[in-house]
Image (cartoon, grey):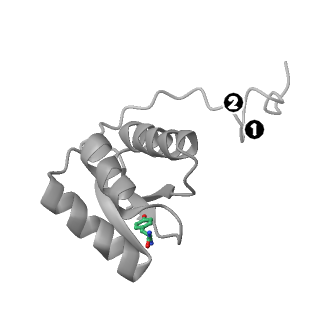
Amino acid sequence: MTAFPDRMSDGPKGPGQDTSVLTKTKTKTERPPLYKVMLLNDDYTPMEFVVHVLERFFGLNHAQAFEIMLTVHKKGLAVVGVFSAEVAETKVAQVMDFARRHQHPLQCTMEKE
Ligand code: TYC
C-alpha cells in the first residue's frame, strides 16, 4: 500500500492499452470505393480487336464499342466503365490476359474514382 498511484494500472495508457468500451454508434454507411477502368491507346492493336474486347468484357453493343475505341484512338485513353474494386480488377485481368494471348500490346488499367 502506498499513496502513489500504481504504475501501469493508472495514468496514461500506451498503445493498445485502452480498455474502455467504445459506445459510439456508426451512423454513416460508407459506400465501397469505385474504380474507373481505362483502355489505353497504342499503335499496334487492331481497331477490330479493341471493339471485340469492349463487346466481350464490358457488355457494350457494337456501336458503343466502336465509339469508345475511336475515343481511345484519338484521345489516348478512355474510361470504359466504373466498377467495385473486385469487378474492376477482374476486368483489367481479363483484358490484359486476352490481349497477351493474342500478342497485342493493348493496355487496360484502373484508377480510384
Ligand atoms: N491505335 C490503334 C490503331 O490505330 C487502335 C487502338 C484503339 C489501339 C484503342 C488501342 O485501346 C486502343 N490500330
Q: Which residue is mark 1?
A: 14
Say whether residue 8 is visible: yes
Q: CA distance from mark 2 to mark 1?
A: 5 Å
Label 1 near label 2: C-beta < 8 Å? Answer: yes
Q: Is mark 1 within 8 Å of ligand 1?
A: no
Label of residue 17 in the image: 2
Image position of 21 with respect to 62: above or below? above
Type of amino acid under label 2:
Gln
At x 31%, y 42%, the residue is 57
Secondary structure type for disc 1: loop
Left or right, residue 103 beside residue 47: right
Q: Residue 74: which quarter of the image?
A: bottom left
Residue closest to the eye, 83 or 109: 109
Q: Amino acid at mark 1?
A: Gly
In front: 83, or 75?
Answer: 75
The numbered disc on residue 101 is: none
Quick check: which quadrant has ligand 1?
Answer: bottom left
Q: Position of residue 60 (x, y in %)?
A: 19, 50
Instruction: List x then y, in percent, for residue 34.
Output: 34, 51
Can residue 28 be seen in the rendering of this structure? no
Q: Split into 4 quadrants, where in the image is the N terminus?
A: top right
The picture places residue 40, in percent across and down from the top left corner, at 47, 66
- Residue plotted at (68% across, 32% down): 16
- Pointer 2 local density, CA inside 10 Å: few below 14, some 14–19, many at least 20: few
Label 2 residue SS: loop
Q: Nearer the viewer, residue 96 or 9?
A: 96
